[in-house]
Structures are given as C-alpha cells and as structure tokens.
Image (spheres, grey):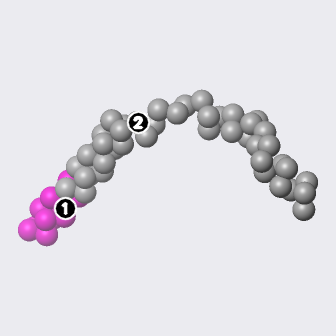
Amino acid sequence: MEVLFLLIAASLTVAAGFLVAFIWAVRNGQFEDRYTPSVRILIDDKEQTNQTVEK
C-alpha cells in the first residue's frame, strides 16, 4: 500500500512538471505562429529551387 502512495506522488510530480513546462512555453510565445505551418507548403522557397536548377 505504501508503494501505491509513492507512485501517486511520483506521477503527480511528473504531471506538475509538464504543466509548468507547458505554461512556460505558452508565456514565451512558442504557440503564437498559427498561420505559417498551415501554408508552409504553399510558400515557394526561391533559394532552394535555384540551387536545384544549378546542379
């Protein structure tokens, strides 16, 4: 029974760590770019196409 309490405490500690990491990421702007990922495939990267043509 003591092991169960230890495992619950350990899992709550890990969950709290993930929550703190998520809040830190949100506050530092990690999730602010909502536009670029959805249209990244549509953007023509001219430097990359010029390099492939020259080879």
Calculate the distance from the C-alpha at mark 2 to the C-alpha at mark 1. 29 Å
Q: Identify the main secondary structure in magenta.
A: helix
Residue ID for mark 1: 10
Q: Quadrant of the C terminus?
A: bottom right
Disc 2 residue type?
Gly
Residue ID for mark 2: 29
The residue most toward the top is 35
| Contact? badges 2 and 1 (CB < 8 Å) | no
In this rendering, position of residue 38 left or right of residue 28: right
Q: Residue at x 52, y 33 (%)?
A: 33
Q: In terms of secondary structure, where does tag 2 sit?
A: loop
The picture quadrant where one finds residue 52 is bottom right
Q: Nearer the viewer, mark 2 or mark 1?
A: 2
Disc 1 residue type?
Ala
Residue count near mark 1 (Cα–Cα under 10 Å), binned few <14, some 14–19, many ≥20: few
Q: Is residue 11 visible?
A: yes
- Membership of 6 in magenta stretch: yes
User: Closest to the observer: 33 or 16?
Assistant: 33
The picture quadrant where one finds residue 26 is top left
Residue count near mark 2 (Cα–Cα under 10 Å), binned few <14, some 14–19, many ≥20: few
Residue 46 image position (x, y, % from top left): 80, 43
The region drawn magenta spans 1-12
Q: In terms of secondary structure, where does tag 1 sit?
A: helix
Q: Quadrant of the N terminus?
A: bottom left
In this rendering, position of residue 5 left or right of residue 24: left
Q: Is residue 8 visible?
A: no
Residue 7 image position (x, y, % from top left): 19, 64
